[in-house]
Amino acid sequence: MTSFPQQQTLQQTVLNAAHRAAGARLVDFAGWDMPVHYGSQVEEHHAVRGSVGVFDVGHMRALDIDGAEAEAFLRRVLANDVARLTPGRALYSCMLDQQAGILDDLIVYSTGEARYRIVLNAATALADLAWLQQHLGSAKVGLKLRDDLTILAVQGPRAVELLPPLLPLALAAAAPGLRPFSCTEDGDWFVGRTGYTGEDGFELVFPAAEADAFWATLLAAGIRPCGLGARDTLRLAAGMNLYGQDMDTGVTPLECGL
């Protein structure tokens, strides 16, 4: 009797039902059931270039790192130097193996004295965490994967106009004044002036329990839902590398132009 392998169940972000209700076409992306578009990838691309769109990137993982030796630890495991950061600032970096192969590329935010947040790619998040734990040793550092949070990216030239009034009050006042690669937080709500589209905009990390209501608020304000297809064409046009395609453990940062 021939046996067939069972189909693996895809992971879902907290907004999966909202995507289905909006008519999204969903695909398997790194083991996650993700929207590739909501009818027209081209229109979504142009919405971000000319106005504003929102991407569900809840498949990516937020990892909080703190402790007396957090800075020294991150200086050892990341290619870029977190000692350059002051609280409220961020930088792009890579996590490298011993041969300078790229394990992941990421953004690291300084959220306070000896406190950091990094955002890991979906396909590599668990391996990244294992790598960090492997190299922790006796360092006085805490690692906390924030599975209670989700992530949205609101991108486009009108993001600074339309998003801040929809945020909790303290963030509504602070967000418009953020410089690129800066961040601010209020409780479990976090806003960074960062993105992966080549446009102005923000990335939001906030409680997953509030995702459905906030997503509906964004759409009601005229912010267009966009899928991974437009995210890919936007980052490609902006010259941004994609992990697993432009870089991996067989490529160094110098070889792929970082």
Image (cartoon, helix red, strand yellow):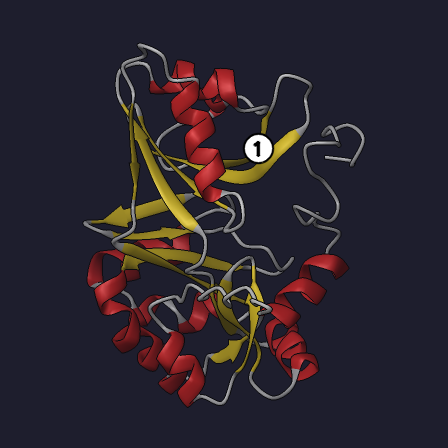
The one nearer the camera, 97 or 168, is 97
- Residue on which disc 1 sits: 93
Q: Amino acid at mark 1?
A: Ser
The one nearer the camera, 38 or 131, is 131
Write the residue at 49% across / 78% down.
225
Image: 89 above or below 188 = above
- Left or right: 242 as drawn, with respect to 71: right
Q: Position of residue 54 (x, y in %)?
A: 48, 71
- Left or right: 91 as drawn, with respect to 46: left
Write the residue at 37% across / 81% down.
18
- How many numbered dots are placed on residues in this image? 1
The one nearer the camera, 167 or 188, is 188
* Residue most extreme to the top: 138
* Residue most extreme to the front: 1
Q: Position of residue 31 (x, y in %)?
A: 51, 60
Mark 1 closeness class: few <14, some 14–19, many ≥20 residues within 10 Å: some
Write the residue at 39% across / 27% down.
86
Image: 132 above or below 152 = above
Kindly indicate the quadrant of the structure image that contains residue 235.
bottom right
Kindly indicate the quadrant of the structure image that contains residue 252.
top right
Q: Position of residue 5 (x, y in %)?
A: 54, 64
The one nearer the camera, 128 or 208, is 128
Write the residue at 58% across / 39% down.
105
**Quarter placement of the C terminus:** top right
Q: Secondary structure at mark 1?
A: strand
